[in-house]
Image: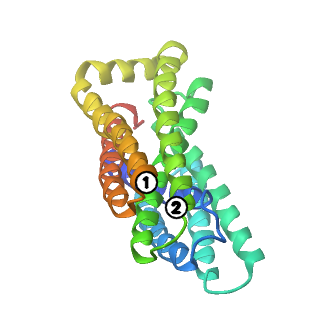
Amino acid sequence: MNPYATAFVLFLYQVSVGGLVGLSVTPFNDLERGFYKSTAGVLVVAAVLAVWGHVDLLSHRQGFWKIVELALLAGFTLFLILYFISLWGERGFLRARFFSTAILTGVSGLAVASFAFAPGRLGPVEAVALPVSFVVTALLLGAVTVGMLIGHWYLIETGQSLDPFFRVFRFFVTMLVIQTGVEIVAVLLLYLLGSADTAAALERLFKHHMVLLSSRFLVAQLGPLVLSYMIWKTLSDFKNTMAATGLFYIALLGVFVGGLLSSHILALTMLSG
């Protein structure tokens, strides 16, 4: 099994699940349906690629939990596609059910997928810290993706209320702060209360990959935090959605690069054989 391929496929999965949750922050009745069609289309592409990658990886590594993980990912992708199709119809009840079911199966699949990244025996601390960390990271990836896409939509449909943009922006900042806190607490708990294998993996991380870890913090945490202040000032003081969208693009690059660096770190230190 290629650990780097596994981590990258997980990254695509996180983007699609987190992006769908990010859509739930927006006021559905205040934005044109075209925004949801285009955004859901992007998420469908990421989810389909993730399923495709999981199917290929499953041929190299089988087991009960891998099958459960693939089933949940496939279920998420199916309901996401059904939600995407329902955007062309008027059956709001079905659309809401497809949307909520996709989120439920997606988050469940992320929780199961995280167990593969325990370096050995899955203890009680790992069983809680890993799923929480994976889901929170997915929400941050989704928040910055939806933020960039909604900003792009404001460039197409001018003259709209800025409230939806502010909602997504606040969600992005909230998840950025929460993820930073979760990562610090999770590392401390895993090192102090986790299994011996987990403690050894963390020691390898801090001893041999400190430059990589520091780069990830600067690019994915500190950089987007500074950009978030600039986005807020641009929207609140100048009402300039074009400039705010450009800043969101830069924030997206930082968060995405950070997500890929996290995948690399997982492959180096945390992935079980």
Q: Check disc 1: other Cα within 10 Å, few if <14, some if 14-19, many if 20+.
A: some
How far apart are the alpha carbons under marks 2 and 1? 8 Å
Label pair 2/1, CB-CB below 8 angstroms? yes
Q: Read off the residue under disc 1.
A: 235
In percent of the image, x 45 and y 56: which residue is there? 15
**Most extreme residue toward the right, as rendered?**
93
Examine the rendering and report whether any part of residue 97 can be seen.
Answer: yes
Q: Give above or below for 192 relative to 129.
A: above
| Mark closest to the chain's N terminus, 2 or 1 | 2
Quadrant in the picture for residue 95: bottom right
Give percent across and percent down for residue 21: 59, 56
Q: Is residue 58 left or right of residue 88?
A: left
Residue type of the residue flagged with mark 1: Leu
Residue tagged 2: 162
Between residue 46 and residue 118, name the one nearer to us.
46
Which secondary structure lies at badge 1?
A: helix
Q: Amino acid at mark 2?
A: Leu
Mark 2 crowd level (few <14, some 14–19, many ≥20, 10 Å Cα): some
